[in-house]
Every structure is written in C-alpha cells, then in structure tokens.
Image: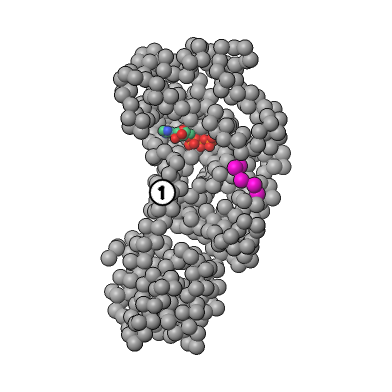
Amino acid sequence: MSDVSSVPRERVLLIDDDSTVLRNFRLCLEDAGYQVNTAHNASSALSAVARSVFDVCVLDLHIGDESGLDLLPQLRAAAPWMRVVMATAESDASIAVATMRSGAADYLIKPCSPEQLLHAIARQIDARRMERRIEELEDRRNEPALESVESANPLMARMLEIARQAAESDATILILGESGTGKNVLARAIHNWSNRRKAAFATVNCPSLSAELLESELFGHVKGAFTGAHDHRQGRVQVAEGGTLFLDEIGEFPLSLQPKFLRFLQDREYERVGDPRTRKADVRLIAATNRDLAASVAEGTFRGDLYYRLNVISLTVPALRERPEDVMPLARNLLTSLVARYRRPARRFSDSATNAMMTYSWPGNVRELANAIERAVILCAGEEISYEHLPFAAAGMTASIASATPRAGDPVTIEQLERAHIEAILGATPTLDIAAKTLGIDASTLYRKRKAYGLG
Ligand SMILES: Nc1ncnc2c1ncn2[C@@H]1O[C@H](COP(=O)(O)OP(=O)(O)OP(=O)(O)O)[C@@H](O)[C@H]1O
C-alpha cells in the first residue's frame, strides 16, 4: 500500500445515506491525510462533483431509495477522471462486479476494516497519479528535459535565490525577460522546487489561441457548449489541480477574457464553458511575459487590477548579453544534451568558436544559442566545433557584425533577412495581429516565427 500520509492533496468523495458509515469512513480517510467530502444523496453528490475536483469516490449501491447504479453514469459523465469504488453489502457482490462494466473501478464489501478501506482508496489514488503522470508526460513530449538554471552571474544568481524562496510559498509569480531568456525553463524549475512538484505542471500559451478557444483551453467545456465541442473536456486548470498552472506570454491575454481570469486569480473559482456551475481549483499560478505590462496597462490593453494581482512576486531573467559568464557553461550543457540526442561526435569548442560565442550579443538569448549549437552539432563531423560550424560563418560574417541589422543585398541568408524584417515590423506595429497583416501571414505563423527567431 502506498504511503498516503505524504499525499495530503488528494480528494475523496463519500456517497452514502448512512451517516454512521459516512462519519467512520471520513475519519479514517482524513487521518490518512486525504481531503474528504460527503454526500448523503444523489443530488448533493452531483453538486459536490460540479463544485470540486475529486480523485476518488466511494459510492454506495443503495443510497436510501436511490440507486448507486443509476447515479454512476451521471458521475462518470460529470467527472470522467474520477475513479469510482462501489460500496456494497456482501449479498450484492455479484451486482457490484457488474457495475464495474459500467465504469466503476473497483468494489468494496461492507462492513469493511479501516485497512480495507484505505487499501481500496490507495489503489485508485495510485492509478489516478499514474494517469496524471501520463497526461503530464504527453504535455512535455515536445519539450526539452529540465535544464539546469544555475548561473555564475551575480544578478541572475540573486534572482534564482529569490525564485527558490518564492517557490516554497503558493504566491503568484510573474516572470519577466526578453524572449528566449529561459522564462519557461525557470517556471518549470520553480514548480520542481515547490512542494507541488509531484502534481502536474500545465502550460497555456496565451497568444496562440483566440479568446473563445483560450477560455475553453483554460477552464474546459461541456459537450455541445459550442460548434465542435463534441465531448466534455477538462481545462488546463483542472489538469494542473494540486500543481502549477503556467501562463506563457500573459501580455497577450485577450482583454475580453481578463475579467473571468481575474476572478479565477482572486478566488480560484471558475465555470466551464457551457456550464453555469462554479468550480474550485487548487493551483499555483506562474505567468511570464516579454512585454512591459505596466505600459500595456497605460495603453488600456491589459487590466490594471489583473496586473497588480499577477505582480505579487516578479522575477526578471536577465538577457544573455547581460550575463556573459553564462554563455560557455550553457553552451557546454547544450552541447552535451544535443550530442546525445543526435548521436554526433562533437565533444568541445575550438578557441575560435569560443571567442565568437563570447563576442556575439545573442539578441535571441538562450534560444538563439541553443539553435546555433544544434546546427553546429549536426554539421560538425569531428570532435571539435569550430567557428565554421556556427551560423555567423554561414552568413560570411565575423561575430562582431553578426549582431548588426542585415539589409537586402548584404551577404546574409534569407532567414536572417526575414528575422530582421519581422523584428522591424513587430517594433513598428501595436499588436501581433496588425504585424501579421502587414507581413501577409497569419497570427499563429507569426507567433511561431517570432519564437523561432527569438524575437520579443
Ligand atoms: N538554462 C538553460 N539551459 C539549457 N537550455 C535553456 C536554458 N534556458 C533556456 N534554454 C533553452 O532556450 C530556449 C528558450 O527558453 P524558454 O522557452 O524558456 O525562453 P522564454 O524566455 O520563455 O521564451 P519566450 O519569451 O519566447 O516564451 C528553449 O529551447 C530552452 O530549452
């Protein structure tokens, strides 16, 4: 049996019309560290499930005049992730087995000992944890392994110290910094330093979705809530239950959805799209942006009250050019992981490559450094990466002019010209949408290109 005392956050719902059973089960489970709610009939059970997220439910086969068998499909529809243990008298055992075909995960014969109850619950909690882990791994499928965020730079080291301290609390954290500096990486590190590390870390990319889709992505929706909503869907808030919800590029959060999000931030309460019932969430919030949010507030594109709620603890990740001490340690870590990924022979950097990397200003920050090393690892046939393998050389430039803005006709690649053009348009237009229109591409393509080129 698993050590349930170290898992205080898992929630159990007990449904039984017998108040003695409810009290005894509750005391036993609370002693073991679970959060327990009780319901003595079908309607109070359904409203409890609508309000809160439960991991496991113990459902009596006979709830007074009502049938647990009738309630089971309704519970399954309202909370498909919740694992239901059917509780039954010995004489009903054959029915209990049949209910498992209707979606119950297990059955428990009453009367039972505290050990039997704890054992039945722990088995389902383990299964829930496994499912969560799979959801999280699916989430992380395309993300790199957790990088080290250590730094030899005093400014960065001080920021990391505050981040570690803040990780221990549940306070909302706002991470600021240019694009590509490692704000996502830091958010995940904070989650891993926190006592929520065993629960999920769920990310929402604010600018890649319209207000309607973002609302559903965050809070979930019920079947038929809008065209295309063929099924109930849990939102990222629910995936992050007990863990951390990370909102990337919060500066792009649609104004129309900001009031609902503000309420969620204040009370941790929300409704799924198409369902008026209010639900509670237990999540820690981390948000990141490369925008000047105070300026967005002044311009009226970001609500002031939301900004102040988010800005409880703010951490600024310095640009890579402000922490030159980190360039080579980062480069070496990236080399090690990329060589393993591509199974390539490169093992070190030549003096010329080191000099070039130390001189360059890395406007795209760590993302640009990672891209440069990935390219070099692929191109390098021997053990030593030299200047020729770096992107500066491909463009026929010296490292010192690589940071200058290229113009049409310069000896540069089409990609470098595209990057410079996108950067200039982004700087000259007030919103991503207008920039996309000017460039003649759609906003999501611009979003991808901006990310790939490390543009803020
Ligand atoms: N400490 C690090 N070690 C190794 N790689 C890192 C580190 N920090 C960042 N990276 C890599 O740099 C890239 C950019 O990092 P990340 O996405 O965290 O930046 P960001 O500041 O959140 O960018 P954006 O503002 O565009 O969302 C990623 O590929 C990431 O893996």
Given residues 444 and 430, the one toward you in this image is: 444
- Residue 257 sits above or below residue 357 on the image: below
Question: Magenta span has 209?
Answer: yes
Left or right: 179, with 225 as reference point: left
Q: Is residue 190 visible?
A: no
What residue sits 59% from the left and 65% below the top?
278
**Left or right: residue 438 compared with residue 100:** right
Does any portion of residue 437 appear in the rendered image? Answer: yes
Name the spot of residue 453 as percent of width and height, x first: 54, 28
Secondary structure, magenta segment, majority class: helix
Instruction: State whether residue 101 is above or below residue 291.
Output: below
Query: Is residue 299 located in the magenta-colored stretch of the structure?
Result: no
Point out residue 311 in the picture as x, y percentages from the top left corner. 57, 45
Where residue 115 sits, quadrant-wise, is bottom left
x then y, percent, for residue 408: 63, 15
Along the line of sight, which residue is nearer the eye, 191 or 128?
Answer: 128
Residue identifier under label 1: 137
Residue under the point 41% across and 73% down? 101
Q: Number of labelled discs?
A: 1
Q: Which residues are magenta?
A: 207-211
Q: Amino acid at mark 1?
A: Leu
Identify the residue at image location x=50%, y=73%.
Answer: 73
Say which quarter of the image contains residue 417: top right
The residue shown at (40%, 53%) is 134
Task: Reply above or below: 227 against 49.
Answer: above
- Mark 1 Cβ inside 8 Å of ligand 1: no
Image quadrant holding the C terminus, namely top right
